[in-house]
Structure formats: C-alpha cells, structure tokens
Amino acid sequence: MSETLSSVLNVTSEAIEQSIENHKAEISQDEVGKIISSVGQGIVWADGLGRVKYEELVVLGKETIGMAFDLLPKRVGIVLLGPGEILKAGDEIKRTGRVLDVPVCQQLIGRIIDPLGLPLDGRNPLPDEQRRPVQQEAPPIMARAPVEKPLQTGLKVVDALIPVGRGQRELILGDRQTGKTGLAIDTIINQNDKNVLCIYCAIGQRSSSIAKVVDELRRHKALNNCIIVVAEGNDPPGLQFIAPYAATTIGEYFMAQGRDVLVVYDDLTRHARAYRQISLLLRRPPGREAYPGDIFYVHSRLLERSTHLRQEHGGGSLTALPIIETEAQNISAYIPTNLISITDGQIYLSPDLFQKGILPAVDVGKSVSRVGGKAQLPAYRKVAGDLRLSYSQFQELEAFARFGTRLDKKTRKTIEHGRRVREILKQDQFAPLGTAEQIAVLLAVTEGLFDEIPLTRIYHLQQLVIDSVREETGLTERICKSPKNGPVWDELVSKIEKLVDGLQKET
Ligand code: ATP
Ligand code: MG
C-alpha cells in the first residue's frame, strides 16, 4: 500500500517539476526575445517578448537600450536609443520591466546631458537616486492657475508687443537662418538675474551649432542657470524623439518645487521628422506629408505639460518656447499649423526683414500672444497700444510711399514717426534690456521725442537714454507702480527731452 502511494507521489512530484520547467521556458520566452531583422536607422523587429509592455525599455545584445514601440501579435517593433550598428539578427533581447526615465536632481543645473541623463560635458555622472518617467500626464485643469507673471525676454519688440507670460507656450517660427535660435538664447540670457531656470533642448542639430549655443551661453554667464539636453542629428531617431519629453520631465521636477522654468525646444520640425522616420520604418500608415496621423497628439501631449501651477501644487511654472522651421515662408504647412493651434501664440520671424537688417526680424503683423497680455507689466500698456497702432499705420503707408506718390504733411509725419518706431524696435543680439530701459526708450518714441532726430543717430541716442536710466535704481518699480500720468512718467519724458536737446546742440 505504502509503495503504491510513494510511486504515485513520485509520479506526481515529477509531473509537477516538469510542469514548472515548462512554465519557466514559457516565461523566459516571454521575457527574452531575439532580433529577427534590423531595418537599420534605429529600428529593430523582435521575436518573443510576449509580455513586453508598450514603451518598456529592453536591452539588445550586450548593452544597447531600446524601447518597445510597436506591439504586434507575432513580433515587436523596437526603437533603438543607442548605437545599432553592432546588432545583428539572432541577438538576444531582454525585458527590463522599466519605462524610460531620467535622473532628476539639483546637480543637473549647469550640465549638458543626453535624453537618457548621461553627461555629455565630460564631467561626473549624475546621481540617479531619484528618477522620473519621461512620459508623464499633463497637470489636470484643477491644478492650473492663470498665467499672470511676465516672462521678460529682454527684447523690446517681444516684451512690448507680443508679451510672454510664465506658463505660456509661445511658438517661434520662421525660415532657416532668420534668428530663431538667437531669439531663444537672448531670452535665456535675460533670465540670469530673474530666478527662472532655463532648459535648452537641442533636437537633431549639428554638433557645431550646439557647440556655438553652449559657447554663447557660457560667454554671457548663463550656463550656470541652464540645463542643456542634446540629441544630435546623427543620434538614433528614437533618442531625438524622446529628447523634448526628457527635457520637460526635468522641467517639471523643478516646477513642482515652486520654481519658474523656461524650456526651449530647438527645433520641433526635426523632432517631427524623427518621429516620421520611426513611424514609416514601423510601417505605420503615412498621412499628410507622410507624417503619421498621431503627430498632432505627439506635440500636443508635449506642450500640454507646460503650465502655471496653483499654489497648493507647488506654484511653479513651465514656459515653453518651441521652435519650428518653415520652408519658403509657408506657415500653413502641416507641422507649423499644428503647432500654431497647440500653442498660445507665435512669434514669426520673416526672412525679408532679416535681409533688410531689421533685427530681430519679428513680423509684428503675423505674431500674436494670446494670454501674455494679461501678464504684461502694467507699465507697457502706456506705450504698447500707441506703438502697435503707429507701426501698423506706417507699414500700410510705407507701401504707398514707395511708389513716389506725393504725400501730404500728415502722412509724411506718420511715415517719419513709423521709421523711428521701426528703428527703435531693432535690437542687437546678446543685449537684452531691463524693463525700465525698454520703457524709457519706447516712451521716448511714442511721445514723438525722436521725430526730429535723423534716423542714423537714433541708435546713439537710444544708448544715451539706456545709460541714463540704467544708473537709477528702483526705477522699474516706480514706473510699474505709477498710474498712467504719474510724476515718474513726466520725470522720464523731461529727462529724455534733455538728452535729445543735448544731442541736437552737439550737431
Ligand atoms: P537655423 O535655421 O540655422 O537654426 P536660426 O533661425 O536659428 O537658424 P540663428 O542661428 O539664430 O538663426 O541666427 C542666424 C544668424 O543671424 C546668426 O549668425 C546670428 O548671429 C544672426 N542674428 C540673429 N539675430 C540677430 C540680431 N538680433 N542681431 C544681429 N544678428 C543676429
Ligand atoms: Mg537655429
């Protein structure tokens, strides 16, 4: 009897062991896969990996990292985030059970990293005790507060006419070589003393352009207030695709601590191209201009993450300045129109103005800021209305004047005034101006104090006004607090009048 029992038990335990072995094999087939084929250019098809999850990290071969991106019944499409040249068909792929994340810590400030958080500046690796997933949900509506504080760019034309608020998304778009990066860099430099942390995310650019930006930031002492996230043009498209999300995740970490953060995405055209490349290689159906149908979602889910948080949620803000390159001034192409509709306004840089030497080449007529007006410092209201009106009147009249039409006195005066407004809105690169300096110059031109000065001398006079205002401490506060006709305004006007008189006597 006992023999029978033991034999039965033996059989049973054998059966159980066998079943466990089988199950292990099944699991390992689910956890480990094989490369079927490598399409090249950053994509790999894999067999096995039955339980892999969407956007889960996998390790291919010895150490190449990839992200499961297309989960099909019989195979898995993997986007590479590291070099793919060393991989070949048959190489093993292991699941990691993790999603993509980046290290977040205070030490990030002043560093140059890649979208995986690895240093590119030759300094120590970053501590990675704390990591945050790269893909995050945008803050819910109830956590958001209205945009009410300005983000000063230091550029007269932007701060006066197209003001940007903290938490706003303002698109910078224009053809190639029109000063898009320049405008963003000026804005970053202007935050040096404003307690706004800046993140510059370079996507798909040449390393020489990135080196130039880093150099300019270093030269203007802005690098220590900056985090630079880089995915170069010759990095795998997967890395370029995740770069802006990684930069935003880092921004959100600081925003949650109550800090104001500015993120520049330079540029999202290249980001869209990287995503198109991935999608086409994964055989997803192409849509307009061969972009996949979800390209709008890809960009909107990125930019929805910029906001101004309510005090209970940390009270910080994340301002986004995405950059888009247009082709032959076509702002109604697919990606530009998508981004125009996602963002809260756009700054359009025109190649025509750039060629005429009107720099920054902001086309005021085609630029708009939909929420920034509410956040603009009250002092600008006194000057900005007149400025916009007289400038747009002038632009219309100037077209007529070009035909040599004889003009009456009033029209001539409007044109002369407009020319001075245009001259005043020009600004050198890397020379952002403080609020009081901007207001003084703009006030002078709107009050018509420069109307009698020859155009060639306006620049010099402007410098005099700036210098005289720069010496006065606390002027910005006084200007901002003063009602529209308060004594400080009269003081400013008489001060500038004196400077103008002095200059006229000199000549
Ligand atoms: P790309 O399309 O190559 O990215 P971009 O639109 O970003 O170009 P920038 O690289 O910013 O343009 O600027 C192009 C050139 O114009 C640079 O040499 C820059 O120094 C010059 N530039 C830009 N803004 C100004 C300015 N306000 N004053 C003088 N030069 C400027
Ligand atoms: Mg650029």
Image (cartoon, rainbow, N blue to C red):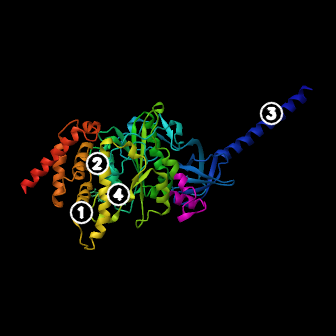
The first of marks 1 and 4 along the sequence is 4
Residue reaching furthest to the right:
1
Residue 319 figure quarter: top left
Residue assigned mark 1: 410
Q: Residues within 10 Å of mark 2 (few under 14, many from 20)?
A: many
Instruction: Determine the secondary structure under disc 2.
Output: helix
Q: Nearer the viewer, residue 183 or 205?
A: 183
Asked if ligand 1 lies within 8 A of label 1, the reply is: no
Instruction: Determine the secondary structure under disc 1.
Output: helix
The disc at residue 383 is 2
Q: Are marks 1 and 4 in contact (CB under 8 Å)?
A: no
The disc at residue 13 is 3
Q: Are marks 3 and 2 in contact (CB under 8 Å)?
A: no
Q: Residues within 10 Å of mark 4 (few under 14, many from 20)?
A: some
On-image quarter of the N terminus:
top right
**In magenta segment, residue 382:** no
In three-dimensional space, the C-alpha distance between marks 1 and 4, rounded to whole angstroms, equals: 24 Å
Residue at horizontal 53%, vertical 59%? 276
Residue at horizontal 62%, vertical 46%? 53
Q: Are marks 1 and 3 in contact (CB under 8 Å)?
A: no
Q: Mark 2 belongs to which amino acid?
A: Val
Q: Mark 4 belongs to which amino acid?
A: Val
Asked if ligand 1 lies within 8 A of label 4, the reply is: no
Q: Residues within 10 Å of mark 1 (few under 14, many from 20)?
A: few
- Magenta stretch: give its range: 273-298
In three-dimensional space, the C-alpha distance between marks 1 and 3, rounded to whole angstroms, equals: 105 Å
Judged by depth in the image, the label closer to the viewer, 1 or 4, is 1
Residue at horizontal 40%, vertical 40%? 148
- For the stretch drawn in magenta, the main secondary structure is helix
Q: Percent x, y for residue 401?
A: 27, 69
The first of marks 1 and 2 along the sequence is 2
